[in-house]
Amino acid sequence: MVAPAAGFYSTPGVGLNQVRIAYVLNQKDLVRSVEILREALLQYKG
């Protein structure tokens, strides 16, 4: 997984020439954590 790094910094202009790289070891846990976060956001919204 790769994401632009500029969004991780609050200082304008920082991270423009960087990327963040993530190596997912357990895809099943990652998918489950997103499901849990989705449910939490729905509960918070309601």
Image: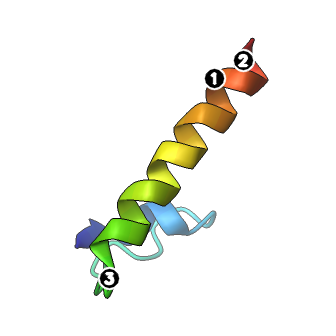
Does residue 14 lie above or below 44 as drawn? below
Tell me the tag on residue 42.
1
Residue at the location (29% across, 67% down)? 3
Crowd class of label 1 (few under 14; some 14 to 19; many from 20; radius 10 Å) = few
Total of numbered circles in the picture? 3
Using the rendered view, name the quadrant where residue 4 is placed: bottom left
Residue 18, image x and y in percent?
30, 82
Q: CA distance from mark 3 to mark 1?
A: 26 Å
The residue that label 3 is drawn on is: 22
Badge 1 amino acid: Leu
Badge 2 amino acid: Lys
Tell me the tag on residue 15.
none
Q: Are marks 2 and 1 in contact (CB under 8 Å)?
A: yes
Is 14 displayed left or right of 2 in the figure? right
Residue at the location (33% across, 68% down)? 28
Q: CA distance from mark 2 to mark 3?
A: 29 Å
Q: Which type of secondary structure does the marked residue at label 3 adopt?
A: loop
Using the rendered view, name the quadrant where residue 41 is placed: top right
Is 11 displayed left or right of 44 in the figure? left
Q: Which type of secondary structure does the marked residue at label 2 adopt?
A: helix
Residue 1, image x and y in percent?
22, 73
The residue that label 2 is drawn on is: 45
